[in-house]
Image (tube, grey):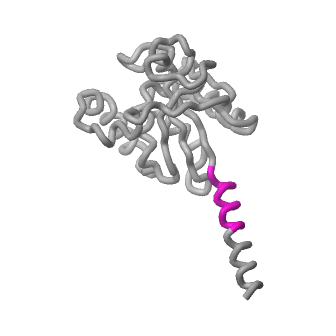
Amino acid sequence: MKLLLTLLILNLMTLITNQKDTTKEIHLGGGCFWCVEAVFEDVKGVLSVTSGYAGGESKNPTYNMVSSGKTKHAEICKITYNTSQIKLQELLEIFFLTHDPTTLNRQGNDIGSHYRSIILFNNSQEEKIIKNYILEINQNLYDNQIVTEVKKFKNFYNAEQYHQDYYKLNPKQPYCDAIIRPKILKARKILEKYY
């Protein structure tokens, strides 16, 4: 009986360890976090998407503080994903398709440094993958105009609860219908394999 219990515990520990090995996080900002969240929420292999703030220096910022521009934070989504189902390069493909990485501190009518295009990497391996991906698409697709900021991840602060799952909870809201819905439809049409 002890042997059976020990084997069960070992198998459970192995399963938990393997799950941790395949679970990663990446932090992406491509304008309004409602848009980024809505695009990534239903991607195969994405376990969760959380809207928040990162890339600046202020601790525990609020939406009002971030949108004032004084915190230097951007609207960011923390994307938790399973590497056995989707790779970082594939997340980058979705990210660059669904926002304009060539406009500095804005996405459409959303203007300000908190709407900038930004990727926060966790380690040198991710940094290399991200920079190589950007180099390739910058030359081949964007005529060397990408302004996406790439920097080391430090801290992430969850946005207020009313920002979480915003599109799913408010699909008829005018901004959601006019801005977010077309992004989702474009992503699902062009990158159908990820949904």
Q: Which residue is drawn at 35% across and 16% down?
A: 109
The number of numbered discs placed on residues in the rendered structure image is 0
In the displayed structure image, the side of residue 111 where residue 167 appears, left or right: left
Q: Residue at x 66, y 30 (%)?
A: 153
Residue 11 versus residue 173 in the image, above or below: below
The N terminus sits in image quarter = bottom right
Residue 127: horizontal and vertical position, in percent?
Answer: 70, 33
Residue 113 versus residue 126 in the image, above or below: above
Asked if the stretch drawn in magenta spans residue 134, the answer is no
Any part of residue 96 in sight: no
Any part of residue 110 in sight: yes
In the displayed structure image, the side of residue 126 where residue 35 appears, left or right: left
Q: In which quarter of the image is residue 167?
A: top left
Residue 22: horizontal and vertical position, in percent?
Answer: 65, 55
Asked if the stretch drawn in magenta spans residue 14, the answer is yes
Q: Residue furthest bottom?
A: 1
Q: Which residue is drawn at 66% across and 25% down?
A: 151
Residues rendered magenta in the picture: 13-23
As rendered, which of 78 and 8 lies closer to the eye?
8
Q: Quadrant of residue 144?
A: top right
| Secondary structure character of the magenta stretch overall | helix
As rendered, which of 97 and 47 lies closer to the eye?
47
Q: Quadrant of residue 156?
A: top right
Residue 119 versus residue 18 in the image, above or below: above
Residue 99: horizontal and vertical position, in percent?
Answer: 44, 28
Residue 11 versus residue 128 in the image, above or below: below
